[in-house]
Amino acid sequence: MLIDVAILAIGVFMIITAIAAMATKSLLVSILLSGGVSLAASVVFLLMGAPDVAMTEAAIGSGLTTVVFLYSLARSKQHDHEDSSESVEKPVEGIGGAV
């Protein structure tokens, strides 16, 4: 009975966290929230009696995937504070005074 309530509470937490990950404008926050969803899923697997699946989800889903996403965010040229609807500034033409 107590395990069922814990699984339900974690499930609600996962849904709220997933919606927040989709709604946020910040890529960094979205990556961290999606890692939190995977970590919560691994806890649910553990509570359901599947420790091998829980360890795999924690290692790959929460750990490795989050690290790969953070690495790709660091390597990308898009800044975290940019909105995808913003226009990119045009490069300055005629450096040296000539236009």
Image (tube, grey):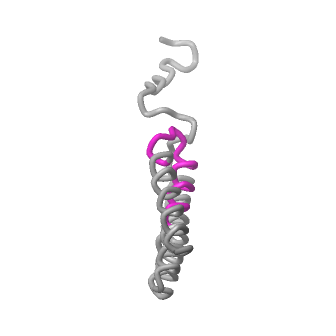
**In this rendering, does residue 39 appear at all?**
no
Q: Please tell me how many numbered marks the rendered image carries.
A: 0
Q: Is residue 77 above or below residue 41?
A: above
Quarter-of-image position of residue 79: top right
Residue at position x 52%, y 49% in the image: 30
**Magenta residue check for 63:** no
Q: Position of residue 25 (x, y in %)?
A: 51, 38
**38 above or below 45?**
above
- Say whether residue 30 is magenta: yes
State which region is magenta: 21-39
Which quarter of the figure has residue 22?
Answer: top left
Inspect this view and state whether residue 67 appears: yes
Q: Is residue 32 above or below residue 82?
A: below
- Residue at the outermost bottom position: 52
In the image, 85: left or right of 71?
Answer: left
Q: Residue at x 49, y 56 (%)?
A: 12
Image: 14 above or below 99: below
Is 45 or 8 nearer to us in this picture? 8
Q: Nearer the viewer, residue 55 or 4?
A: 4
Where does the image place residue 16, in percent across and percent down from the top left?
Answer: 49, 50
- The percent coordinates of residue 76 (x first, y second) are 50, 50
Characterize the magenta stretch by its predominant secondary structure.
Answer: helix
